[in-house]
């Protein structure tokens, strides 16, 4: 599932108001948090660590109204630890988000 500008960017824009520097800072913070959780998923070898990282992703997605990321986080919650397809789709979302 690819990143598409929409509700996430609207949420960031609403939080930043007319301040482009703040918008960039919020976007960067979102990206860093997303990178961190994907890394934790990659390294998770037990159900507990996998579930914690997936739940954090779900919280991040919900906080920023990122519906596609929310769907991917739900997939992660339903998957076995280390599921490469889930991690690959999340990385694709991150790559697309970072490219915009």
Image (cartoon, rainbow, N blue to C red):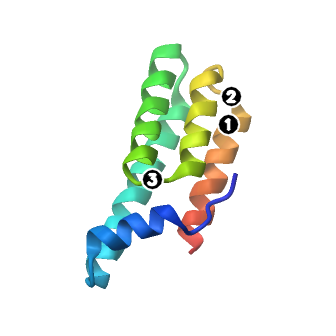
x then y, percent, for residue 79: 65, 23
- Name the N-terminal-most of marks 3 and 1: 3
Kindly identify the residue that appears in the image at 39 percent across and 57 percent down. 30
Could you say whether the residue bearing mark 1 is in a helix, strand or loop?
A: helix
Kindly identify the residue that appears in the image at 35 percent across and 75 percent down. 24
Mark 3 nearby-residue class (10 Å; few <14, some 14–19, many ≥20): some
Mark 2 nearby-residue class (10 Å; few <14, some 14–19, many ≥20): some
Q: Eyeballing the image, is 68 above or below 21? A: above
Instruction: Tell me if 94 is positioned left or right of 89 in this view.
Output: left
Mark 1 vs 2: CB contact within 8 A: yes
Mark 1 nearby-residue class (10 Å; few <14, some 14–19, many ≥20): many
Distance in Å between CA atoms under marks 1 and 2: 6 Å
Where, by quadrant of the figure, is residue 100 drawn?
bottom right
Kindly identify the residue that appears in the image at 46 percent across and 50 percent down. 34
- Name the N-terminal-most of marks 3 and 2: 3
Could you say whether the residue bearing mark 3 is in a helix, strand or loop?
A: loop
* Mark 3 vs mark 2: in front: 3
Residue lying furthest right: 85
x then y, percent, for residue 32: 40, 55
* Mark 3 vs mark 1: in front: 3
Distance in Å between CA atoms under marks 3 and 2: 25 Å
Distance in Å between CA atoms under marks 3 and 1: 20 Å
Residue 86 got which mark? 1
Residue 83 got which mark? 2
Residue where numbered disc 3 is placed? 65
x then y, percent, for residue 69: 56, 48
Instruction: Tell me if 54 is positioned left or right of 24 in this view.
Output: right
Residue lying furthest top: 47
């Amino acid at each position: 599932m690819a990143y598409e500008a929409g509700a996430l960017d609207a949420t960031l824009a609403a939080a930043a108001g007319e301040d482009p520097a703040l918008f960039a800072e919020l976007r960067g913070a979102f990206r860093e948090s997303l990178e961190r959780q994907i890394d934790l998923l990659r390294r998770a070898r037990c159900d507990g660590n996998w579930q914690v990282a997936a739940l954090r992703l779900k919280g991040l997605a919900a906080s920023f109204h990122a519906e596609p990321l929310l769907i991917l986080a739900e997939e992660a919650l339903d998957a076995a630890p280390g599921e490469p397809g889930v991690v690959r789709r999340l990385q694709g979302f991150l790559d697309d988000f970072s490219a915009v």
